[in-house]
Amino acid sequence: MRQLHPPLFLATLWIAAGAFAQPAPQPLAPRPADLAPAQADAPTTTGRLRQWLVNPNGEVDGFLLADGTQVALAPHLSAELLKTLQPGDSVQVSGWPTQGLPVLRATRITAGGRSLADAPPAPAARAPRERGALAAMNASGRVARVLYSGRGEANGVLLDGGSIVRFPPHVGAVLMPWLQPGMSLSARGWGSRSAQGAALEATAMGPTADSMQELFAGPARGPGPESGPRGPRGPRESRGPVPPAPPTGEPLPPAPPAS
């Protein structure tokens, strides 16, 4: 198995984290599939549901088929989907493939004679969905596969132990060479556990628990050789503002001491 090289990983992660200080990127231009495609025109794939994919709020926002295809869907469908399907069921998925990736953005899911379409929720159902409190979590293991949004942006990884680590797409774009299957990864963040799986939104990641780097870090403000990632002590000296606490109001876990 390949191992992540800590100095290279951390230096690259520092570059990705620095993007938080930049102006917000412009929204991606919509592809034809984003412009309310007719569901009847979407190609259909049949397979067996192997595993749920969940977001840090505990909502199902996709699943894996037995052939490895990732199906991405809107999280507001989570409750209805759990009433319709369970792992091992045969399912038909109508959706739009993502070019170059084994990812389908589902528009309709059919199983056991029941069908669920991806449509905006009715006005009466647009109240905020009830979510459990986020908890401080850690996850570590080897990357089993990279996860993508329906638009093909890398936004997480599935670890070999079953946990899911999510991160912003711009971090995924920078770290893709270091997030390949078989590589070791440790993460700290906020998330939830349920019968469908465990997922966290990473606030720190690294090849090992001792070398995790804060995702929201930026260059240290002091002058001299210790002031930035090029100083003698490397990128772990680059400390930025700590991300805000989640809705629970609990403090973030302490950052590892600089070596």
Image: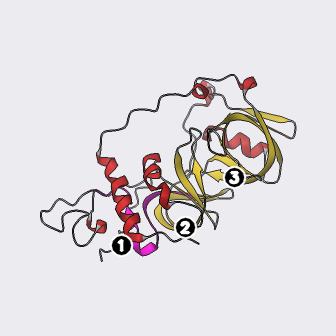
Check disc 2 and give the amino acid type: Met
Which residues lie in the magenta part? 199-218
1 vs 2, front mark = 2
Provide the secondary structure element on which disc 1 rests. loop
The residue that mark 1 highlights is 256
Residue 249 appears anywhere in the view: yes
Q: Which amino acid does label 3 sit on?
A: Trp
Q: Position of residue 209 (x, y in %)?
A: 45, 73
Disc on the earlier residue, 1 or 2: 2
Q: Position of residue 90 (x, y in %)?
A: 84, 46
| Residue picked out by circle 2 | 183
The kind of residue on which mark 1 rests is Pro
Q: How crowded is mark 2: few (under 14 residues within 10 Å), some or many (20 or more)?
A: some
| SS at circle 2 | loop
Which of the two residues, 203 or 145, is positioned nearer the viewer here? 145
**Please, which residue is most extreme toward the right here?**
113
